[in-house]
Amino acid sequence: MAEIALNALHKAFDDFVAVRSTDLTIRDGEFFALLGPSGCGKTTTLRMIAGLEMPTSGRILLDGQDVTRLRAGRRDIAFVFQLFALYPHLRVKDNIAYPLRSQGMSAADRRQRIDEVAAVLRIGHLLEHNISALAGGDRQRVALARAMVRRPRAFLMDEPLGTLDAEMRGAMRDELRKLHDRIGATSVYVTHDQVEAMSMADRIAVMDKGLVLQAAPPMELYNNPATLFVASFVGAPAMNFLNLEGPLAPGGGTARLAAAGAPEVPVRALPAGVDARRIVLGVRPEHLRLEADGALRGSVYATEYLGSHRLAVVETVAGNLRVRVPKTRHLAIGEPVGVVVDPSKTILFEAESGRALNRLDGTPVRAAAPETPGTFRREAADG
Amino acid sequence: MSTSAHSIVEPTARVKWMAGVLVAAYALVTLIPIVWIVMTGFKSPSDSIAYPPKVIFEPTLEGYVNVFTTRSRQSAEYMAQLPPPQTWYEELVRERNMVITGPSRFADRYMNSLIIGFGATFLTVILGVMAAYAFSRFRVPLRDDLMFFILSTRMFPPVAVAIPIFLMYRELGLSDTHLGMIVLYTAVNLSLAVWLLKGFIDEIPREYEEAAMVDGYSRFQAFRKVVLPQAKAGIAATAIFSLIFSWNEYNFAILLTSGQAQTAPPFIPLIIGEGGLDWPAVSAATTLFILPVLIFTVLLRKHLLAGITFGAVRR
């Protein structure tokens, strides 16, 4: 059980900066997800916490103890690899026993520990098998067992469900979360799949280009994304973005969409001290309505029936918009429709920096100091 | 045009039969000299040089006895007054009016070959696997250039540097020493070993060692307990290639060794009997000389063929 703190953690490979001076605190017992596209630095961050990668600068604290220069094996952290990395030349039980051997534990104690984790993960019947004889889900359980058997201070998982098929992934997701609640050890989970992160994690850090853009609980990320990138990455289907033609009046009112022949849409008030010339309006599909007399005219481009509701893609002069409509609403392809934007459900972004200017409830977002964890610093990313 | 369906991957019975005949014919051609050597080892000196060559002959162990002994011819009177022979080989020698005066130097030369051959192989594999691991896993500065440099040492025949090495060895006092020959053969084999082993180690996912390192092992322990077992096939192949070279090497052996560290290859062709070369003894020595490499290869064959299994990693 441990709190993991990253202080100005920085990692560069020659010219390429993988992780840019990151501050992050992962609380004791938290299930924390690092979410981002490939190459965003999430795996490098995880590997630095594990001790498999040496940071270029910055510090890593485990419960306040500086482990930055400590060998991986001395950090008492377990790592679950995407490809499981089970030793093919050993049997299941020898794989699980491997971390215990390094501690010089007696055979009887090892036996007991193995039986314990095997019971938790329901792999008792597989202990004598060879690794190659196991199916994907079972290999995953064995990999977890090998991580758990040592009772480490923290679990690090690098896309552990990435190689499983969809059905197994869903089942393992629930299983992993249950396991976490039962053990209560700090877990850091790397994934590029926002559904995985949203469904399992207590908090998520969204990363892009080596930067943590926002670290927040799933609902906060979804409702109040800190940047354009977070808004577009989190949520399926993705948020709609409309470029506004500025400058916007500070008090709100209406603004014209930045497209030839586009109508005006109502917008909320801007916070003070913002460059009002280039603003992007973001709105989730469920906050758009299709109405016969909606000001933003368009035609139905495609519809997706998703069981509980229907998703309509509407082609407008301002681009394609995704609108969530009731499943009973029938729409013909090409049917002319009007889209209504509810200003109270929108988030305005500064186009230049990508920074969100307000929260969903309308309160303004202040430009945060760069040293605060989980804040957005696009300027650095461009440098 | 034939209309019958045929598989493009599965050979027909006729093709299989022809392939079988070709392989058998090739095996026969390559085996004839070896079979002839083994046969000659069991011939008497006169049978060995008989013309036309004898395929059917009365086998004798004279060649083998001659390889291991030095003998001298004695007069009939002297032979008559000797006590009866104690052993079968004494008896064999006396039939030709000779007595055994002592052991030959063959056993020493054979031992030298074993020490130098296996010593160089051992050193090649140890150094090769560590260098290959480093090149495979670490960010070695100028890695590609260094790998090319290592390969470039194979771009000329080793004998091309025989004279510099001869002079160097004389200065360093390494001429005609076991250590000198082991170092030399290791140096020649190492380039091939590093390239071969790097290929094998590149194929082993890093996650294996990383998992072990996170689980409390040092990098060296992870290397020894996780990487080495998985690189078995590569190590076996490297060891065989290295042993075959060191075991058979003739040019350097004849140049750099004469007494103390002389290996079997320069020694065998010079086994002199009565009236020139003692062909049965030469053949007997050659037969014995082939055996270790043969046994070594057969022992490691399974690892060679087994290849590497990545059972736990889905690719």
Image (spheres, coloured by chain):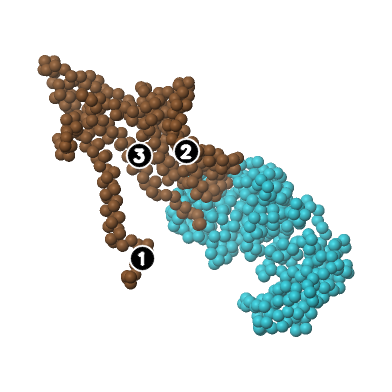
Secondary structure under badge 3?
Answer: helix
Around disc 1, counting alpha carbons within 10 Å, would you say few (fewer than 14), some (14 to 19), or many (20 or more)?
Answer: few
Instruction: Indicate left or right for A271 with A232 as reference.
Output: right
Residue B308: give x, y in percent of width and height: 44, 50
Around disc 3, counting alpha carbons within 10 Å, would you say few (fewer than 14), some (14 to 19), or many (20 or more)?
Answer: some
Residue A336: give x, y in percent of width and height: 72, 83
Same-chain status of marks 2 and 3: yes
Verify CB contact (< 8 Å) between mark 1 and mark 2: no
Around disc 2, counting alpha carbons within 10 Å, would you say few (fewer than 14), some (14 to 19), or many (20 or more)?
Answer: few
Instruction: Quadrant for the N terminus of chain B, please.
Output: bottom left
Instruction: Indicate left or right for B238 with A331 as reference.
Output: left
Secondary structure under badge 1?
Answer: loop
Q: Return the disc, 1 or 3, that comes first in the chain's sequence.
A: 1
**Which label was assigned to residue B155?**
2
Q: Return the disc, 2 or 3, that comes first in the chain's sequence.
A: 2
Q: Identify the amino acid type marked 2.
A: Met
Which residue is disc 1 drawn over? B7
Residue A281: give x, y in percent of width and height: 78, 69
What chain letter is assigned to the residue under label 1?
B
What chain letter is assigned to the residue under label 3?
B
Asked whether residue A2 is in view, the answer is no
Q: Return the disc, 1 or 2, that comes first in the chain's sequence.
A: 1
Q: Nearer the viewer, mark 2 or mark 3?
A: 2
Q: Nearer the viewer, mark 1 or mark 3?
A: 1
Image point (75%, 84%), residue name: A292
* Letter of the chain in brown: B
* Letter of the chain in cyan: A
Secondary structure under badge 2?
Answer: loop
